[in-house]
Amino acid sequence: MQVAPELSAATSGRRFGARMAGRARLSHLDAAGRARMVDVGAKPLTERVAVAGATVVMRSATLRLIAEGALPKGDVLAVARLAGIMAAKRTAELIPLCHPLVLSHVDVTLTPRSARAHGTVDVQATVRLEGKTGAEMEALTAASVAALTIYDMCKAVDRDIEITAVRLLRKEGGKRGRWVRRARAARA
């Protein structure tokens, strides 16, 4: 694999490990720019909550098949919900520098919406825990895997499905406290 010069080991410490003007240091890089796991041992235990979302866009006919339970692989929404929950619990196995966390609650909600030209399923994953590091990656993983599961279960009838807008919506707890994504202005 070729690495772009601006991301090479020789320059990554200077460019990414060092404090950038007006920005915090990237915590997963050491002074030489090498990836490292952050030491959270001295942090206090706090209640943490993270909420992430994704949107799955499909043909209206596909959304009708989901609603009718008429797809060959079964109940799409039930399987996607379970897949999202399972994924949240296994995030540390998928994302190399994530800490293994003991989750106290994972909820994945799937909201179908119908429009003339297309249908969507809005995915929202909420993760709660008491820990020394946040649950953002677990919530993002849950939302992503739930969306991927919808794709997998529907791809036989609709190859044009798109997974969009995977994003953190809200986080609470820890040193920085509460953060909520601001709504974007409508796009033309």
Image: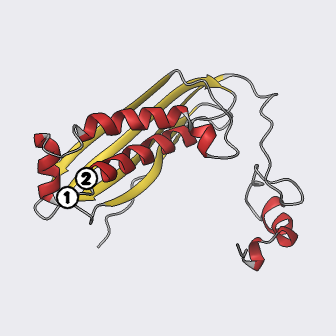
- Left or right of 138 on screen, residue 116: left
Amino acid type assigned to the residue bearing label 2 in the image: Cys
User: Helix, strand, or loop for circle 2?
Assistant: helix
Residue appearing at x 65%, y 38% in the figure: 176
Secondary structure beneath disc 1? loop
The residue to which callout 2 is attached is 154
Using the rendered view, name the quadrant where residue 45 is placed: top right
Callout 1 crowding tier (Cα within 10 Å): few <14, some 14–19, many ≥20? some
Q: Residues within 10 Å of mark 2 (few under 14, many from 20)?
A: many
Give me the C-alpha separation between circle 2 and circle 1.
Answer: 6 Å
Q: Position of residue 187 (x, y in %)?
A: 32, 69
Q: Position of residue 164 (x, y in %)?
A: 37, 59
**Front residue (pair 175, 48):** 48
Mark number, residue 41: none
Residue at the disc numbered 1: 157
Whether residue 181 is visible here, answered yes or no, is: no
Q: Is residue 161 visible?
A: yes
Residue at image coords 77%, 79%: 5
In-front residue for pair 28/146: 146
Three-letter amino acid code of the residue under disc 1: Val
Give the tally of numbered discs: 2
Q: Quadrant of the N terminus?
A: bottom right
Q: Splitting the image into 4 quarters, where does residue 37 fall?
A: top right
Image coordinates of residue 89 in percent, x first then y, are 53, 31
From the top left corner, tell me how far across and down residue 116 is, in percent: 10, 61
Q: Is residue 124 above or below residue 55?
A: above
Image quadrant occupied by the C terminus: bottom left
